[in-house]
Structure formats: structure tokens, C-alpha cells
Image (cartoon, rainbow, N blue to C red):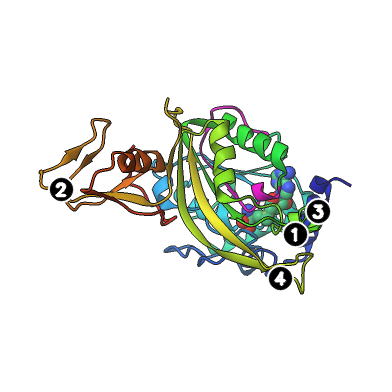
Amino acid sequence: MSYLDATVDVYKQAAETPDVGLCCTTNPVWQLPGLSIPKRMLEMNYGCGSTVNPRDLVNDPTVLYVGIGGGMELLQFAYFSRRPGAIIGVDIVDEMLAACQANLVEAEAQNDWFRREFMDIRKGSALALPVASNTVDVAAQNCLFNIFKADDLRVALEEVYRVLKPHGRLVMSDPTCEQPMSEALRNDDRLRALCLTGSLPLSEYLDVITRVGFGTVEVRAKRAYRILSPNHYATSELVYIESVEVCAIKDPMPADGPCIFTGRTAIYYGDNDHFDDHKGHVLLPNQPLAVCDKTAGALAALGRDDIFISPSTYFYDGGGCC
Ligand SMILES: C[S@@+](CC[C@H](N)C(=O)[O-])C[C@H]1O[C@@H](n2cnc3c(N)ncnc32)[C@H](O)[C@@H]1O
């Protein structure tokens, strides 16, 4: 059985018997005025962060959600796009599709603004999306892509890139891990399916995203996720896993490489009324400017003693330089 088949088995079971401990969200669930999330949907929250950000959802976007789980984030996205077919949900597991549909029936009963016709639920794989090219404004996946091995991860990202409109955005939440893991852990298909042993170091994760062509990437949040300890897992040392929220934007790739925002800031503290690098960045005295890592590096390389560059906070919420 391939690891992809093992993954289908895990989520068939998770659809039939909700497992609140299956994934480990450490961020609070979005509560919005007039939004009621059915109990079973909450129990089937199998993500590791949130992909729903009001800032991405202006102008009634068409949203694609890959790996639907119990449908909680589909419902949260529908809150911002209330029209027939606005939210396309794709999943490969029949039992998950059925469970999500049942949860959406309950959601319709609990929310007078919500209609199931806002949802277009399709059976299909993240590796061959049943969605036309250049038709989606916002795509999202939560805790699915980390399960994929390298070649499949590249294909899944290429698929999302294909269906996004120019400047469309892919919002993701996945575990990342900076430590090496034992081969026993890496090759355990069930643990991989449970989002525990497939994760990459953040820099590698960002690298795969930008190699597919996304010209702008934002690391919006980074949090503690899980510990794999020797008393419970096939590892000789503690393995610390984090989860990240990342937004990859289908902007053209700049000639000098992608703009990756990791929460770095430049502050000018010289004697002039501004500093201009003549590459589009104007720093005003003592006013922080969020900069991408490329710009942070270029400013640091000037070797000036009147520009401070802060380290990455891994918290970025817009307003940046490029
Ligand atoms: C970890 S769960 C996350 C569910 C949901 N995103 C959430 O945050 O609750 C992974 C989801 O991906 C689905 N899935 C697994 N393999 C898939 C594939 N190859 N293509 C599409 N969906 C898949 C599973 O059925 C499940 O719904």
C-alpha cells in the first residue's frame, strides 16, 4: 500500500469517527458575528492553524479549499463569499466528502445567512485538481501538503499555481521541523498521514513554494505544534515540530528572486529626513518599514551604521516593501 493510500485510510476513519486529538490547532478557532459552527465540525478540526484571513477575502473571491475535513474552514470562507459556487471544496476520501456534506446541512440549520449552494464540493485529488486553470482568487490547504513526499508536494503546489488567477493567493498551514528525523519516523506512513513526520525545515518548505513560481511569500505565523519523544516514537532525541501559516502569491517572479517576508523590519536612524535606496524603499527616521528578506539582506550589505534591521519574527501581517 502506498503512503497516499494509507492517508486515505486514516481520513476515512477520521471521517467516520471524529478524533479531536488528531491534529493540534494551537490558534483559537475564528468566531465571527452571526457564525455558528456545528459541534461535529469543531470536533473534525484537523488543521494545524488557520487559513482564513479577512484581509485575503475582499471583493467576494472564488475560494478553492483542498482537503476539506469536516468543512469548518469552508464555512468560515463562505462567511466572506456568500454566493452560489463561491467556495470549491476538493477531497479524495468519499467518507470525508459525506461527513462534510452532513456537517454543512447542520451549518445551514444553525446559520440563517448560509446556503449549501455557496459550496461546490468535488471529489478529486490535490495532485490532479478537478478545477479549470486561472479561475480561483484564493486557494487554501490546511495540514495536507505536509503529508506529501517531495515529488507529490511539487505537483500539489503546481496544481494550485495552475488554477489560481494571476496575483491569486495560496494560504497554507502546515507543520515544519528543523531537526532531522529518523528513517523509521520518515517512513511510517501512518504517522506521516497524521501530519507528524512529513514536515520540512521552513527554509526548504519556502524553497519548494518559490521554485513552483510564486513570486511573493508571506510567513504570517509560527507556533509550537508537537513533540515526538523517545518514550512514544522511534526517535533517540526529542523532536520539536512547529506549525506555520504561509501565504504564497502568484505574483511574477522578480528578476533577483522571490520576495519572502518573515517579519523583518528596517529602521533608519540617521540625520537626514529620509534614506532612499533607489530601489523602491524609502525609510523615514525611526519609522519601521516591513521588508522582505532579500531587501533586508541588501540593506544590511550596505554596511551603514544608521539602519537597523530586525531579525525575523515569523509574524507578518502586510504593509511590506515590495
Ligand atoms: C489533516 S486533514 C485536514 C482537514 C482540513 N483541512 C482541516 O483543517 O480540518 C487532511 C484532509 O485532506 C484530505 N486528503 C487526503 N489526501 C488527499 C489528497 N490526495 N487529495 C485531496 N484531499 C486529500 C483528507 O480526506 C482530509 O480531509
Residue at x-position 56% and y-position 39%: 207
- Which image quadrant: the C terminus? top left
Q: Which mark is residue 178?
A: none
Q: Secondary structure at mark 4?
A: loop
Q: Which amino acid, by three-letter code, is at mark 3?
A: Asp
The mark total stands at 4
Q: Is mark 2 within 8 Å of ligand 1?
A: no
Residue 215 at what x, y percent from top left? 46, 33
Q: Nearer the viewer, mark 1 or mark 2?
A: 2
Q: Which mark is residue 229?
A: 4
Span colored in magenta: 129-147
**Disc 2 to disc 3, how far (Cα)?**
56 Å
Who is closer to the viewer here, 111 or 293?
A: 293
Q: Nearer the viewer, mark 4 or mark 2?
A: 2
Residue 233 at what x, y percent from top left? 77, 67
Mark positioned earlier in the residue sequence (4 or 2): 4
Mark positioned earlier in the residue sequence (4 or 1): 1
Residue at x-position 66% and y-position 50%: 146
Q: Which mark is residue 189?
A: 3
